[in-house]
Amino acid sequence: MLLCGDSLDHVSGQLVDIVDLHRVGRYDQDKIRPIVVKLRSGWDRRILLSRRSTLRTYSERVFLAPDESLEVRRQHTLDSLKTRAERAGQLISVSDGILSIDGVEVFSLSNGHANRHG
């Protein structure tokens, strides 16, 4: 299990605080079971997922995958942006999976964040 922590530290470039980890599935000598890791910080999770390509330089074969699908993560992001805009008293519109705030398209479920730089 130490290998798991070392690989996460390698990817993030700093120590990662692991709260809990466990293997998934039944033991089978011929198969490698995935490890589910619970991190103390959501920020560490974001860093690890964005930098997971650095695992190519790690000595062992390790793969990182988010615990939620892209669709679920985007829905959470849309909901969060919508809630923030509601609290700020902004005009919100959601149509066909596209979130517009004050008449400006901000986020879509199919493409993620709208390009803010033109």
Image (cartoon, rainbow, N blue to C red):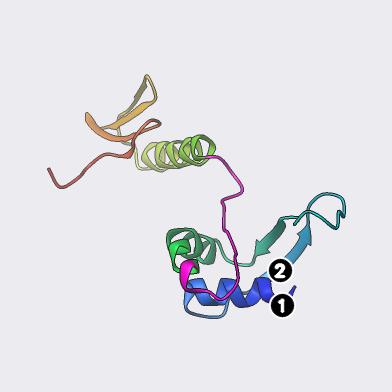
Kindly identify which residue carries mark 2: 19
Q: CA distance from mark 1 to mark 2?
A: 14 Å
Q: Residue at x 41, y 36 (%)?
A: 82
Q: Horizontal and vertical percent for residue 104?
A: 22, 33
Residue 67, placed above or below residue 93: below
Give the quarter of the image for residue 108. Answer: top left
Q: Between tags 1 and 2, which lies in front?
A: 1
The stretch drawn in magenta includes residue 55: no
Q: Horizontal and vertical percent for residue 30?
A: 81, 55
- Mark 2 residue element: strand
Q: Give the magenta part as a residue range.
A: 56-69
Q: Residue furthest left?
A: 118
Q: Residue at x 39, y 25 (%)?
A: 97
Residue 82, placed above or below residue 24: above
Task: Tell whether 83 sits left or right of 61.
Answer: left
User: Does label 1 or label 2 sit earlier along the sequence?
Assistant: 1
Q: Quadrant of the C terminus?
A: top left
Q: Horizontal and vertical percent for residue 37?
A: 68, 61
Residue 69, placed above or below residue 9: above
Q: Amino acid at mark 2?
A: Val
Q: Quadrant of the N terminus?
A: bottom right
| Label 2 neighbour load within 10 Å: few <14, some 14-19, many 20+ | few
| Label 1 neighbour load within 10 Å: few <14, some 14-19, many 20+ | few
Task: Tell whether 27 sits left or right of 12.
Answer: right
Q: Amino acid at mark 1?
A: Leu
Task: Tell whether 2 sits left or right of 51.
Answer: right
- Mark 1 residue element: helix
- Residues 68 and 92: in front is 68
The image's mark for residue 2 is 1
Q: Horizontal and vertical percent for residue 15?
A: 56, 80
Q: Residue furthest front?
A: 30
